[in-house]
Amino acid sequence: MEDYRSRRRILRGSADENAVAGLADAQQWALLTVDEADPERGIPAETLWRVVGGVSFHLNRDVLIGEHYFYLSGWRTERVEECASRVESALDFWPLRELLVAAEDTTQPSPVRGRALMRLGLGAGYEFDPQVFSVVSRALQDPEPDIRNTAMFACTYSPWPAYKPVLEAIAAKDPAPQLRQTAGATLRAFISGGGS
């Protein structure tokens, strides 16, 4: 049986790996592993603690945007969500509603909006979320090529099949040849990763 995972939460403000380590010490979590990142293979650095029997806390540093995020995993959904609720009350993270608002803010310069899109992609759930899909899909069709490109990366965090028609359209007719190639590569990654 595959472990259930809570939603990924992106740390912000004063919450960093030191804050998480302090929480782990205070809660007497058992440190299980510390793995280095492998950016060439897209593998984030990860520190893993056992919270309680059957539930683990994962702290990762994303290789694309360099931000820390966490999630909990275990085989009992209710227990994982109960632990996630307690942890979330102790750490400062980006709530989904703020990620959505930031990613939709077209008044921001492209680099700021692009980072917000990446955060939204990273903070999206594993299960299809129509609000996240709507925001990322609109960004995939944005007039600015940089935003379309960033949105393609953002949708790879949660490769929902609903993205496929939008990516196919980009691969077929985007005015930027590089974006057509990126969309094709993203579609191939979706297919090989089970997102189709």
Image: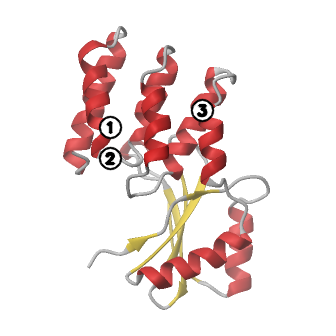
Tell me, yes or no, whether the two marked residues, 1 and 2, touch with CB atoms within 8 Å. yes
Q: Nearer the viewer, residue 118 or 127?
A: 127
140 shown above or below 61: above
Name which quarter of the figure residue 103 lies in.
top right
Q: Nearer the viewer, residue 133 or 174?
A: 133
Q: Residues within 10 Å of mark 1 (few under 14, many from 20)?
A: many
Q: Position of residue 89 (x, y in %)?
A: 71, 72
Query: Which residue type does callout 2 highlight?
Result: Trp
Q: Residues within 10 Å of mark 3 (few under 14, many from 20)?
A: some
Disc 1 versus disc 2: distance between alpha carbons? 6 Å
Name the secondary structure under disc 3.
Answer: helix
Q: Position of residue 124 (x, y in %)?
A: 48, 51
Q: Which numbered circle lies on residue 104? A: 3
Q: Position of residue 3 (x, y in %)?
A: 35, 75
- Residue 195 visible: yes
Q: Residues within 10 Å of mark 2 (few under 14, many from 20)?
A: some
Name the secondary structure under disc 1.
Answer: helix
122 shown above or below 175: below
Q: Residue at x 37, y 10 (%)?
A: 176
